[in-house]
Image (cartoon, helix red, strand yellow):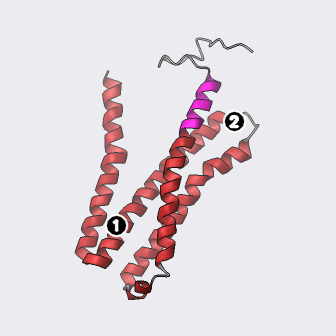
């Protein structure tokens, strides 16, 4: 087996890896990111699922119940999205489809992050709404959404622009 890298296969980042090696590395990095997001998503989903069985749940008003149901739906969706790349890997295993797997999993991971950010913001909104009132809920939800946008969208955009200017 040859380990040499053709010039067409080499990347400009100095890694000197074949497209197959790059695909394997990218898949490993996606799996690591999925492990992080999946754990948090599953904990949040479990937390939300148990709320309906708490004594105070019957005290929620109609608005809070609708928000809660939307959050449970979003959390379940986020959990399903977070495990989808593994299912996709199983379906494509041995088909020499690593580039397609990496591309699809990257998209699924981005959608998962979006749904998780909505779920986190909504959960903050619901908790503050129940504990401190509707205004506090709106402020908490808005703040959490702002932080998610700033940290997960704006900051990476700034870093990418800085890198492209170098």
The picture quadrant where one finds residue 159 is: top left
Q: Is residue 16 left or right of residue 143?
A: right
Give the main secondary structure, helix, strand or loop, of the magenta stretch.
helix
| Residue picked out by circle 2 | 97
Residue 92 shown left or right of residue 57 in the figure: right
Give the farthest residue toward the bottom. 58
Q: Residue under circle 1?
A: 124
SS at badge 2: loop
158 relative to 153, above or below: above
Would residue 84 appear left or right of 113 to someone viewing this image?
Answer: right
> If the image is split into quadrants, where does the N terminus sit?
top right
Query: In the picture, which quadrant includes the C terminus?
Result: top left
Tell which tag, 1 or 2, sits nearer the viewer: 1
Which of the 4 image quadrants contains residue 98? top right
Q: How many marks?
A: 2
Label 1 – label 2 distance at C-alpha: 40 Å
Q: Which residue is painted at 38% across and 66% down in the image? A: 122
Which one is in front, 42 or 129? 42
Is residue 129 in the magenta section?
A: no
Q: How far across and how far down the image is residue 85, in percent?
A: 61, 48
* Residue pictured at 54% horizontal, 47% vertical: 34
In x, y percent, where is residue 126? 35, 73
Q: Residue at x 32, y 31 (%)?
A: 161
Residue drawn at 35 percent across, 26 percent down: 164
Query: How far across and down, in percent of the image, does residue 12 sit?
Result: 48, 17
Magenta-tinted stretch: 18-29
In the structure shown, which secondary structural element does the residue marked by tag 1 occupy? helix
- How crowded is the residue under tag 2: few (<14 C-alpha within 10 Å), some, or many (20+)? few
Task: Give the mark nearer the N terminus: 1 vs 2.
Answer: 2
Residue 47 — which label? none
Picture coordinates of residue 77 (x, y %)? 54, 62
């Amino acid at each position: 087996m040859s380990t040499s890298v053709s010039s067409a296969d080499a990347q400009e980042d100095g890694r000197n890896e074949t497209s197959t090696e790059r695909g394997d590395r990218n898949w490993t990095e996606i799996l690591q990111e999925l492990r992080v997001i999946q754990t948090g998503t599953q904990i949040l989903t479990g937390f939300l699922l148990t709320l309906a069985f708490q004594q105070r749940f019957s005290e929620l008003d109609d608005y809070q119940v609708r928000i809660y149901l939307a959050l449970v739906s979003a959390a379940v969706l986020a959990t399903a999205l977070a495990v989808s790349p593994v299912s996709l890997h199983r379906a494509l295993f041995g088909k020499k489809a690593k580039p397609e797997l990496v591309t699809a999993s990257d998209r699924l991971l981005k959608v998962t992050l979006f749904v998780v950010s909505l779920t986190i913001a909504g959960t903050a909104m619901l908790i503050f709404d129940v504990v401190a009132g509707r205004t506090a809920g709106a402020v908490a939800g808005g703040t959490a959404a702002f932080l998610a946008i700033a940290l997960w969208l704006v900051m990476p955009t700034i870093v990418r622009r800085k890198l492209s200017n170098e």
